[in-house]
Amino acid sequence: MSLCIGMFFENVRLATGTAFVVSSNIGPLLITNRHNVTGRNNLTGELLDEKHAAIPDRIVVRHNKQGSLGDGVERLELLYNADGEPRWFEHPTLGAKVDVVALPLTSLDGVSLLPYDLNNPNSEFRVGPADPLSVIGFPFGRTGGGSLAIWATGFVASEIDIGYENLPQFLIDCRTRKGQSGSPVVAYRPKGRVFMKDGDLCTSNGENFRIFGVYSGRINEESDIGIVWKISVVQDLVRSLT
């Protein structure tokens, strides 16, 4: 369900990242970090591409090939319309403060889409500080085989219900690297006993899977503490589109 993306200026590749798909009233949306599409640090505005000093004008998405999941097929998406306006959507109230955007997908011939369910049907099991979460993405543009993502697993490092720096984000302690920006952050638990939100210990007959947010990078290059934008940010963004 994670998709590797390449950011380009014309035919020059500037960087790689990760994205995933959700459904909306206006069609399928690609969810990724804002800094992936702007080519700038979302806090400072500094250019991220030191080699070419360029910002991306298009991305290439490596989708699942129709009828052959796990095999990749690349499709081009422009980041700006003919008037030079960005094609992506930002958070309806916080705007550029949130390092998450939604890009409508237009090039989908021969593609199989696997959108995340934002209703989180298995969302009643509890996750808190020191519980494991996984960042599913493409470090350095590498795959786990075929077009499949790599699971990097770490631990919740702050209270999820309390926003880090007064924003809808929380911290994760996970060894992540370039290319994983935009990855979905999920909790996976096999069938068996799980703690629920109300504190009860229940036995689950099936696997439990819950998406918690969007990974957007480490707080410092010397730290393995990273930032996760809460899934409520994506929910708000999708609901704002009609």
Image (spheres, grey):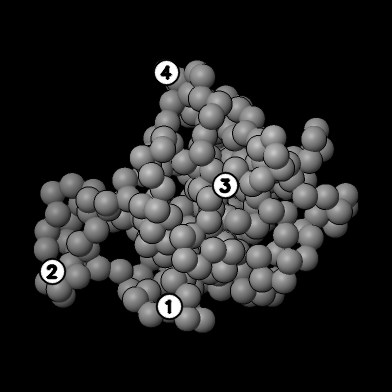
Sequence-wise, which precedes: disc 2 or disc 1? 1
Q: Nearer the viewer, mark 2 or mark 4?
A: 4
Residue identified by numbered label 3: 88
Q: Position of residue 85 (x, y in %)?
A: 66, 45
Figure quadrant of residue 41: bottom right
Q: Position of residue 160 (x, y in %)?
A: 37, 74
Q: Amino acid at mark 4?
A: Gly
Q: Position of residue 57 (x, y in %)?
A: 73, 41
Question: Quadrant location of the N terminus?
Answer: top left
1 and 4 marks in contact (CB < 8 Å): no
Residue at (46% x, 60% y) in the render: 92
Q: Position of residue 200 (x, y in %)?
A: 12, 71
Q: Nearer the viewer, mark 1 or mark 4?
A: 1
Disc 4 is placed on an element classified as loop
Dot 1: within a 10 Å radius of its alpha carbon, few (fewer than 14), some, or many (20 or more) residues?
Answer: some
Mark-to-mark CA distance, 2 and 4 = 40 Å
In the displayed orientation, state which residue is furthest to the front.
83
Figure quadrant of residue 218: bottom right
Mark-to-mark CA distance, 4 and 3 = 28 Å
Q: Amino acid at mark 2?
A: Leu
Q: Amino acid at mark 3?
A: Trp
Figure quadrant of residue 114: top left
Residue at (41% x, 48% y) in the render: 241
Q: Is residue 178 left or right of residue 9?
A: left
Disc 3 is placed on an element classified as loop
Q: Amino acid at mark 1?
A: Gly
Residue identified by numbered label 4: 67
Sequence-wise, which precedes: disc 1 or disc 4? 4
Q: Which mark is residue 201?
A: 2
Disc 1 is placed on an element classified as loop
Q: Is residue 145 visible?
A: yes
Q: Which mark is residue 163?
A: 1
